Image (tube, rainbow, N blue to C red):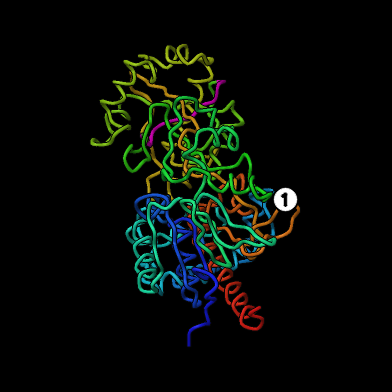
Amino acid sequence: MSEPHDTAHDYDVIVVGAGGAGLAASVSAAQAGARVLLLEAEDEIGGSTQLSAGLLTASATSVQNSLGVDDSPLRMFQHYMDLNGWRVRPGPVRMFCEESSSTVEWLLELGVEIPAQISRSAHEPGLTRAGVEDVWRGHVPKDQGYGLVQVLDKARARLHVDLALGSRVEDLVVRDGAVRGVLLDGEEATAPAVVIASGGLAADADLVRRFLPDAEIAGDALFVVAAPGSRGDHVGIAERHGLALFGQGWGLLLVTAEFQRFHHWQSGFPPASRIHVGLDGRRCMDEDAPYAVSPGILKDHGGWVWSVFDDDARTSLPPGYADWDADRILEEVAKGTVLRADTLEALAGLMEVPPDHLTASVTRFNALFADGTDEDYLRHESLAAKGADPHLAPIAHGPFFAVRMLPAELVCTHTGLEVDARTRVLGTDGRALPGLYAAGEAAGGILGERYVGGGNSVAHALVLGRVAGREAAARAAASTSRTEEDPA
């Protein structure tokens, strides 16, 4: 039996943004019986989720259970909070961890395929080690982020959710202290509940400078892989309606070579036999450190480090990639972006680091990886988790090369509308604005300074989207009941 509908409104729930968060919210709300309108500013659905590997972090799932992985939401919560120094909001984070399991099961029921098998990367379906997590929580779906979006969109269509592409919301409609809908092309579309899932702010350079100043470290090398619709519309909404923002200064910047311009799917990968040294010429990190922590390590070394490799490593690069290609390296040498010298001592001079520091670091690196055990930075464990042989070829055959590694690939931003544990948006006074919910990058309070495992943002989008849709539908139903009880 369907729920009664409030005929005083155009819809029960309006969802702003048709990326992973918005699709999840619209499907969840429709499953609860709500009449839903899904608005998307771009000409296609999917947002940043569609551009991602689709990897999502979750605890206590059937996939983990099938592989004998013992996990719990409480364990995930403790790890998440500790990694972020307890600077994120405990209540919303606890909700996120507790809802992650049922969200994965929900996705499986909808038709997403996550096989119960071990995966060695973010592109192989199954369960993988996704960063610095204490147990494996990285769930990789078949067909990546595109597959997630397609499954959610099919569910949206089955549930008769109205979709309007090319429809950028101008503002909220707020009357009598509550949200009543949205303003679209100068006209009001009304609903007692609205979910803001419009994405982050990575595509707006001015907002990036305001809310993620660390992106300036990369200078002209910065490039954005977020969806073009990530224009930070939620920031304007917050400023116009006295809503709180949370997560300023935080976001995900991946460490890439200075000449890199594409995500690794297109750019390729650097050679395994490479050493990262700081501005003092000494090795300073696991070269395969997860992106949850690698940008922070770079900050401790002046914002960037050198990656040093030899000609054998250069010529061993597989052909066909846009950036990490043997011939492309030589092109970048000609431009001066990559340094080249016949000896390590000469290369150190070009790098302006002490030659004895660089040669000593490379000598030790070669000895450690000839043995296959990196007792300094434990990189052999990172390689083993990928299924790679930790016995690396020595960096020994000139000419030698060096390139700056920078936090230059901007994936997502974490400044969003502050939400509570029910995804309700809070005002600057700390009170929830009735009828307003947020999910995905537009929601703040959970995504912190440290990116917790691969799949943090995709899981965050889908979990919060599902919860926000459910909560919005419940508010709409309650609003309808009140209207029917007192039609005056």
| Residue with the mark numbered 1 | 428
Q: Residue furthest bottom?
A: 1
**Dominant SS in magenta:** loop
Q: Quadrant of residue 248?
A: top right
Where is residue 289? Give x, y as percent: 50, 41
* Quarter of the figure with the C terminus: bottom right
- Please give the name of the residue rendered at 50% of the width and 33% of the height, measured from the top-left corner: 205
Pick the front one: 365 or 27: 27
Q: Residue furthest right?
A: 429
- Please give the name of the residue rendered at 36% of the width and 36% of the height, measured from the top-left corner: 262
Q: Is residue 274 magenta?
A: yes
Pick the front one: 348 or 152: 152
Q: Is residue 364 left or right of residue 429?
A: left
Q: Residues within 10 Å of mark 1 (few under 14, many from 20)?
A: some
- Please give the name of the residue rendered at 47% of the width and 11% of the height, measured from the top-left corner: 349
Q: Amino acid at mark 1?
A: Thr
Compared with 25, 413 (above or below) is above
Q: Is residue 428 left or right of residue 29?
A: right
Region rendered in magenta: 271-280
Where is residue 115? Give x, y as percent: 37, 67
Compared with 408, 61 (above or below) is below
Q: Can you see residue 203?
A: yes
Pick the front one: 338 or 387: 338
Q: Residue furthest front?
A: 488
Q: Is residue 436 magenta?
A: no
Q: Is residue 92 left or right of residue 356?
A: right
Where is residue 263? Give x, y as percent: 38, 40
Pick the front one: 275 or 259: 259
Q: Secondary structure at mark 1?
A: loop
Where is residue 256? Give x, y as percent: 44, 34
